[in-house]
Image (cartoon, rainbow, N blue to C red):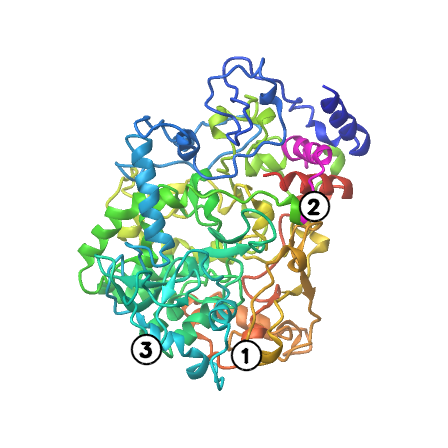
Amino acid sequence: MQKFLFVVTTCSVLLLSACGGSSSNPSPQPVTDGGGGNGNGNGNGGGTGDGDSGSNPASQELLVSRRGGHYWHDYCEGKPDSTAVPADPREMIVPGVNENKAVLMNAWWQTCQDDNQPANCGELRQRREHGLALVAAEGRPGAASFFAGDASESSYSFPADAYAEMWKSVWGLSERPAQYDELVAQRWGMPLSVVRNPYPLPGEDPNANANGGGSGQLPMGITQLREADGTWTGQLNVTCSICHGGAVGLADEAEGMGPRYGTNSLSDITVMFSELARLAPQQAALAIISQNKVRGTGNITNFQLFGVLTIADYETIPSYLTIQAEPSTGTEDPPVWWNVGSRSAKFYDGGQVTDAKRIELSFHFPDFFNDIEAAKQWVLDNQQDSDAWISSLKAPVWPESALGEIDENLAEAGAILFHAKDLWAPSLNNPVSRPEGGNGSCASCHGAYSPRYVNDKTYLDSPLLNGIAAYITPIDIINTDPARLNGNSQRVADYSRNNWFAYSDGPFNDDGVSLCGDWADESLRGDRELGYLAPPLYGVWATAPYFHNGSVPDIDGVLNPDARPAIWRRRSIDAPTDLADKVVMGFDYSFKTGYDAEKIGWRFDKIECGSGLPIPLIGVVTPGVDCNPLDPNGASLQDALSVLWSNGGLAWNLINVPILTPQQIEERKIYNTKLYSQGNGGHEFTSVLTVTERRAIKEYLKTL
């Protein structure tokens, strides 16, 4: 009680009564009809819904997080294999759910698979373990790789010998550096695997000893192929981890830190594929379909929506070129996998429902030119296992030993602000249009997390909706860069109606459009406005940079639009002294030197406009692009590029020159918010928060 009174005092005095919610949304009251959580501190938040929250103090806690993942995995924790698995809570997200509640929902669930629910916890665990090998790969038996499924042979693979000698053939060094494996990981922005992920050095037999595989160590995004009996082949290929295998802190800085599946703001896949293409020309295929123009970002949407959704139906190449004439979706930040189990829709605009799982294996889609029906069957056979592993991932816990202790009193005040502060209260004069419904808080869009609100029926229909975010915020409210929305146009939606990855085989609505297809389609979304899906915020402190295009380097800038830099560069690791100016190092992901615990994000340096030389039409990010006037009225090269790229996704991909020098790679570390699709505007409704309120909310976000 003392602690609760302290928080109330903090809210009413320090935060000027801002924590309490609007007059139309009174402060939360405990639920007493059996909707409460178990309150046992195990991270399950609202629990199983069979408790009495009125008599359970834990149901009123503020600082509890289940850290993402999926309800099924939490439910099965510690239970026997024979335990039956309950229904998926996301199936509750249908029209009418949470109507007139504080938390908004409009991204409806749709069941696409008839074998979603495992029979018991044992089957769920089996799915997860196979999915780990399938998706994480890293030399595990059954690993999948780029356009190869889990086959031991692929036309896209390349020899380990060639990889082992890139220092000479690609980098132009005179001798192999002692730390070569680490330097490849730095150059491409993919940490070395923490598990054994071997490759043979030149002259090595990968099957010559008990350990096998070779004495080299690969980064997370590369795997050595294996035969069905486990025999190593000496052939390498890339995996999903080129975009989804990153690092948060160093392994020796705090427990649970280091390389991590599910998030990566480090990689430069264009550099990687450009260099691999010199070893194996077929590796240039992805560079044609999907590129990034800034290190740490990607364009997987372009690969999936414009690539696999079209070229997989290769008999319709004219349609493929038609789709590529649509605007490019541009720069995107790789989405966080540990939030997949807390979403009802996927892609930044909610473009497909989460249960549309085929697209998750599109990068590993087997050689469809050879036998497309067999390729589709491979996806069907493996999609549940891959999804089970992806949705089981958990967000890291804020490492107090490395980044400082969380101020629990301030965090509790932030939790109340997050869930109950009406950003559109009349006295605040918020210049942004108010969403229709909800209580005007951060939780309205991002979901409820604290048991006090999870167990409050004015917030959620059921505590099982704990931490689930299912609201697509209209673009005129969120107002972040619109390129992603423009790229997923109605023409793309029209084409996808006939595509297998977009479930052209149904289920269908009354217009004959697949309910598991592209929800930008007017026939599916109806009167719901286009916009961006507010993500769940589990582990948000570890997912910088922010917004769907990665344009804001820290949470401080998310909450305060005035704090966002126009042109910036995340800090890099220093090169070894003897290799200075000869190798390219990656971003600094250590907590000691690379992380800003106050602003909550990775440290960066502001870049002044005009400090670099613009190179017309090559796609290299240079800070001079936005200040290179083409006429007295102020038009710039950026304006010309925007016209070009907004009229052709193919142009955005293809207008590049080969990356041949370290200086070109270094320039790709610069984020220029003046470039097409990289704007840092929007989310401006948080400008009404005070400095003290922002500080409290940031402290709370550390606990999720």
The N terminus, quarter of image: top right
Is residue 309 among the parts visible in the rendering?
no
Q: Locate residue 679: give its quadrant.
A: bottom right
Nearest to the observer: residue 630 or residue 28? 28
Q: Which residue was labeled with disc 2?
A: 404
Q: Is residue 210 above or below residue 277?
A: above
Q: Identify residue type, mark 1.
A: Pro
Nearest to the observer: residue 429 or residue 693? 693
Residue 243 appears left or right of 505? right
Q: Which mark is residue 662?
A: 1
Is residue 261 among the parts visible in the rendering?
yes
Give percent across and percent down for residue 409.
73, 32
Residue density around tag 1, few if under 14, some if 14–19, many if 20 or more, within 10 Å: some
Q: Locate residue 89: give its quadrant.
A: top left
Q: Which residue was labeled with disc 3?
A: 203
Q: Identify residue type, mark 2.
A: Gly
Q: Identify residue type, mark 3.
A: Gly
Residue 100 appears left or right of 392? right
Residue density around tag 2, few if under 14, some if 14–19, many if 20 or more, within 10 Å: few
Q: Locate residue 282: give its quadrant.
A: bottom left
Q: Is residue 226 above or below residue 703?
A: below
Q: Is residue 270 above or below residue 210?
A: below
Which residue is situated farthest in the right direction here? 13
Sequence-wise, the earlier of marks 2 and 3 is 3
Residue plotted at (70% across, 34% down): 408
Specify the segment rendered in magenta. 403-424
Residue plotted at (37% across, 58% down): 138
